[in-house]
Amino acid sequence: MKISAKELGVLDMEGFCPRCFWIKRHDRKLPYQTPFAGIFSSIDAFTKNVVERYFERTGKLPVWLESVGQVERLIPVKINEFVAEKDGVALNGMPDLLFQRPDKSYGLLDYKTARYTGTQDALMPIYEVQLNGYAYIAEAIGMKLLNDLYLVYFEPPKREAFDKESALHTRNEGFEMPFRPVVHKLRKNTRHIEELLKKAEAVYSEEKVPAGIPNCEECARLDTLLKLVYGDSIIPERKGI
């Protein structure tokens, strides 16, 4: 089984549903899925370019990343080589920035175009697993001293600042939207990644669809679809198909 570091994070959420995970892993082209807006990929690519080009010109990270500390060099990452295998599971993914410090230790960053709300962010469990998954892969391919993990949120202006910011960033050719970076350091815990990989393999290897959790909204949607197609008898106890 192949799984990305971000997808692995779903298994660490409080509302993790084995039924939903099993179905999604066995059929990646489910119907009625909302397409992902391409603009976010463009923003992500532009952010990476800004940081990497700045480092090439100056030999250091931008001032708004100074809390990350000293960086000696950036490590190029190829997604087809950034993979770790454990007990039949291939974990992949790619951090937005992988770097080495003067003391030869490593660190990584991942960018989020979102407003930072602290650890109460509902997606924080996914982000923590995602970055620790990247660290796990990096260590598996030889970067043993990888200690520092950072989420960098790029926040758009708040509504009360719209008038001021729109006046400052309107140009003849269009307009710019400024983003304020917020750096959040995460605790490293790559041991937990192995636990989640075992959990993922155990659920994925079930011969039949496992039972879902009570009150799972996605299970309810699936049951509604099955009821529309097959009638009431197909889902008497929500135990799979």
Image: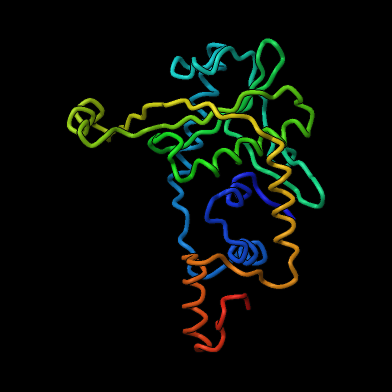
In-image side of 38 versus 100 (left or right): left
In-image side of 157 versus 108 (left or right): left
Colour scheme of this structure image? rainbow
Q: Nearer the viewer, residue 81 or 185?
A: 185
For the N terminus, the quadrant is bottom right
**Residue in the picture at 50% in, 89% down:** 231
Q: Nearer the viewer, residue 184 or 56?
A: 184
For the C terminus, the quadrant is bottom right
- Where 188 falls versus 195 (above or below)? above
Measured from the top left, where is residue 216 in percent x and y?
Answer: 50, 65
- Where 19 falls versus 76 (above or below)? below
Q: Nearer the viewer, residue 34 or 69?
A: 69
**Residue 73 image-quadrant placement:** top right
- Where 142 falls versus 130 (above or below)? above
In-image side of 50 versus 103 (left or right): left
Measured from the top left, where is residue 137 in percent x and y?
Answer: 72, 36
Residue farthest along the right direction in this orientation: 87
**Residue in the picture at 21% in, 34% down:** 162
Measured from the top left, where is residue 42 in percent x and y?
Answer: 47, 41
- Where 98 falls versus 102 (above or below)? below
**Residue in the picture at 48% in, 29% down:** 152
Measured from the top left, where is residue 223 in percent x and y?
Answer: 51, 76
**Residue in the picture at 31% in, 32% down:** 176
Number of dots carrying numbers: 0
